Structures are given as C-alpha cells and as structure tokens.
C-alpha cells in the first residue's frame, strides 16, 4: 500500500510498442506528454558507444543502429527461450537473443564498447523508468508508486516478470491490473453521467503486440469481469510483418536482390510499412518511397487498402475467435451486449472494425474513449484509489476481475487437476485433498 506522504501514484500502460502514463490530479486524469510533446512513448531502448536512449530518442535512431536498439521486450517477458513464439520472433528481430540460465532469453547488445546482456524485464524496467521520469517532470516531484497494466491473457510468469521490472526500476508497484479492465474504468467514468442500471460491455483491445477481449457488467461503480480471452502474441506488429514480407518479395522480383539479411534496409522498410498501415486506415491507397534502400537502389511501390486487408485476413479473422469464446464462457448472447468498446491503436483498422460490427449484427461500435490512452487512464484512476488520492467520484469504484487461465495441481501421471477454472472471480481460495505418490 502507498503511504499518504509518498506523493501521487501514477498509472502506467507498459505496451509492446508504445507506453503511456497518467496521473489523477484536480479531480480528473491527466495523460502526461513526454519531452517531445507526445502522449505515448515508444517502448524502445537503444545502446550506443556513449549513452543509453529510451523512447522517441531510441526509435528515431533505430535505422542507424538496428542491432543495438531493443523493442518488443513484452513479447519476451516471462517466456522461455525455447518457446515457439520466441523462436519465430527472433528471426524477425535485428537484435540478438540468446539462451541464458534456466532457458531465459537474454538480449545481447554492444554498449559503451562492451558486450552486454539484458533480460526482457531489465529492458522493460528502463521503459518504466522513462515513464516515471515523464510523470516527475510534469508533477515536479518524485514518484514512488505506480499501478502497471498487463494483457488480461498474461500468465503468472509473465505477470511476475512485469512486477520484477517494476522492482528493478525502483518503483513500488501497488497493483498489476489487466489492460481491458483498466480501459473499462475509462469507459465507465466517461459514461457515468448518462448510464442507469446494469450494462454489459465488451472491451476489444488490439494493441501493438497483444490482444484481449473482456466482457464486463458495469453497475453503480462496480466493474465485474464475466469472462476474458485473447492472444498474447497478436497485434499491429504482426500486420506490419506481413507487409514487410510482401515488399521484400517485391524488391527481389524487381531487382533480383534479397534485402532480408540487411538489418538497416529491413528497418527502413518496416518504418515505411508502419506508416503505410496507418495511412491506409484513412485512405484507399498509399505509396512507399525509400531512397537507396539497398546497394544504392531506390524502392518505390504502392499498396491499396484491399491488398493490405487480403494479406492479413487470416489474422483479422483470428481476432473474432476470442470474442466468441468470451461470450460462450460468460454464457451471454451477443444481443445482450450494450456496448462494444474499441481499445488499442490497431482497432483503427477499418477491416477489424467491420468484422467486429458484422459479428454484432451491424451494432455501432463505441469509439468515445481514446484507444491509445484508455488503459493508462484506468490505471491512473486505480492508482489514485489505492493511494487514497482520489475523490468521491472514484473512491467507491470496485473491480472484480477473473483468472484468465485455469489453475490446478499436477497429480500422479502428469495430469492436471483443475482447482480453479478459467474466468473464476478472484481473489479465490480452493483446497483439495490429493494423494501424492510416495517417495521412498
């Protein structure tokens, strides 16, 4: 718990690609801009011969220093090196990842002329330090306490590793809360004046690297999660990857040269693809123009929204499966959902919105909350409550969340005996008598 004299507690959305920080001040949440004036900060850390850069400064120099600029730490955190998703990610990253003790993935970089190794939680701790510094510059005082968010579908080791990142950063993590639940707080406070009675709300949270769907009932400041589902490895970056591959093949066809072994060329292409993807959310076609991409060859191409949708259609459709699973687990019919709320930058993609709207039989989607800031907003509200800073508007707010995965014991024969089924409201204790094999 936070002591009263500890100064304000902040809310941090520690994202795969971008992070965001907020604080409760003057009876409202303030989302804080960084020194570049941006309200979200890239989750990037770069190492050079002379310094360490975090955020915009790191992302801005990535093309010049691709092998020592680390991003996507959230896709590694709490996972094993031999995990199949880690192995497929390694093939796409320009920085080097090796197996450390206990099958822990370690990131290798050159820093100040020496080879250094960092765990994912150390990289994440550097991003957390940056977010705290952004808050401190705004508040003019030191910050000790924070609420940090994680994907609802994170497992225990991923949650624990995120807490460890907070410890390494010297932050007292008051609580780890689930991203869609945090976003639901932002939605709930936004709608508070106009809403009467119980509401069933589906939060569809598609970010840079993770995807969550949570179904909640909200009534009189009580936020009760009924079910949650998702994919801890699906997001905007996966859509970028498809476009990068498409253009690598096109460059090969046009120029008979393969750029896939050149980290700098790939990085410049990726940056252009990310920009093109964003542009295609508001226009039907865009161009990619990169001077001297590889061996002095300029690359110029166009891509249509239809082509982008086609190359990602299987991934977009995959986003609908957790929605169905969530409704099934909650034993709720889709016609009883009052609001479908979009969270995360990737929900700006028109095709994603269309598939979701079609699933809910043409229902209008709720776009009233800022998809980039809603999670940090909810985290800041929770931080205010836990540190006793909030006013009566939020002090009576109650969160009832669920465990996303079934929990149990391994019994004889390597079988798991489920004690707490997935989507059980927590905290919850359950005991069971099991016969353990005798060890002589």
Image (spheres, rainbow, N blue to C red):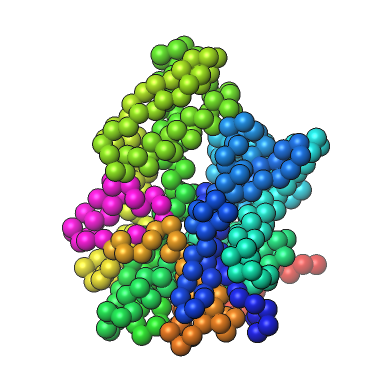
Residue 339 placement (x, y as % from top left)? 28, 68
- The span shown in magenta is 342-365
Q: Quadrant of the C terminus?
A: bottom right
Using the rendered view, name the quadrant where residue 143 is placed.
bottom right
Q: Position of residue 289 (x, y in %)?
A: 41, 25
x then y, percent, for residue 126 = 67, 54
* Residue 164 in view of the camera: no
Residue found at x 45% / y 33%: 272
Report the front residue among 216 and 412: 216
- The quadrant in which residue 329 appears is bottom left
> Is 332 covered by the magenta stretch?
no
Q: Residue at x 18, y 59 (%)?
A: 361
- Please name whichever residue, 162 or 263, is drawn nearer the observer in this view of the structure: 263
Q: Position of residue 61 (x, y in %)?
A: 60, 37
Q: Is residue 150 above or below residue 73?
A: below
- The answer to whether residue 67 is left or right of residue 312 is right
């Amino acid at each position: 718990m936070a002591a009263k004299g500890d100064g304000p507690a902040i809310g941090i959305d520690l994202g795969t690609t971008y992070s965001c920080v907020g604080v409760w001040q003057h009876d409202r949440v303030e989302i804080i801009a960084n020194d570049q004036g941006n309200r979200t900060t890239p989750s990037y850390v770069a190492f050079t011969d002379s310094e360490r850069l975090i955020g915009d400064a790191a992302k801005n120099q990535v093309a010049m220093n691709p092998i020592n600029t680390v991003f996507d730490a959230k896709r590694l955190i709490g996972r094993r090196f031999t995990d199949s998703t880690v192995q497929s990610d390694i093939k796409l990253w320009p920085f080097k990842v090796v197996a450390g003790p206990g099958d822990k993935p370690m990131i290798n970089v050159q820093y100040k002329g020496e080879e250094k190794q960092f765990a994912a939680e150390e990289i994440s701790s550097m991003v957390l330090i940056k977010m705290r510094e952004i808050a401190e510059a705004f508040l003019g005082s030191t910050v000790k306490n924070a609420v940090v968010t994680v994907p609802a579908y994170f497992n225990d080791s991923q949650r624990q590793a995120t807490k460890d990142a907070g410890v390494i950063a010297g932050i007292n993590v008051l609580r780890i809360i689930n991203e869609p639940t945090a976003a639901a707080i932002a939605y709930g406070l936004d709608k508070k004046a106009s809403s009467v009675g119980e509401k069933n709300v589906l939060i569809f949270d598609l970010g840079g690297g993770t995807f969550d769907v949570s179904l909640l009932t909200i009534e009189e400041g009580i936020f009760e999660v009924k079910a949650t589902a998702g994919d801890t490895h699906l997001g905007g970056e996966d859509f970028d990857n498809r476009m990068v591959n498409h253009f690598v093949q096109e460059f090969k066809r046009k120029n008979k040269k393969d750029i896939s072994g050149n980290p700098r060329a790939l990085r410049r292409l990726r940056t252009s693809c990310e920009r093109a993807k964003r542009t295609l959310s508001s226009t039907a076609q865009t161009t990619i123009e990169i001077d001297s991409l590889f061996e002095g060859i300029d690359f110029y191409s166009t891509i249509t929204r239809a082509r982008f949708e086609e190359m990602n259609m299987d991934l977009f459709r995959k986003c609908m499966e957790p929605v169905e699973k969530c409704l099934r687990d909650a034993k709720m019919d889709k016609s009883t959902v009052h609001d479908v709320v979009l969270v995360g930058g990737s929900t700006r993609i028109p095709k994603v919105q269309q598939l979701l709207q079609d699933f809910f039989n043409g229902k209008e989607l709720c776009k009233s909350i800022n998809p980039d800031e809603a999670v940090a907003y909810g985290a800041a509200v929770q931080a205010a409550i836990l540190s006793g800073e909030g006013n009566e508007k939020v002090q009576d707010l109650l969160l009832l969340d669920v465990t996303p995965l079934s929990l149990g014991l391994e019994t004889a024969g390597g079988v798991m005996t489920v004690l707490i089924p997935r989507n059980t409201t927590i905290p919850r204790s359950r005991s069971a008598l099991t016969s353990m094999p005798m060890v002589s």
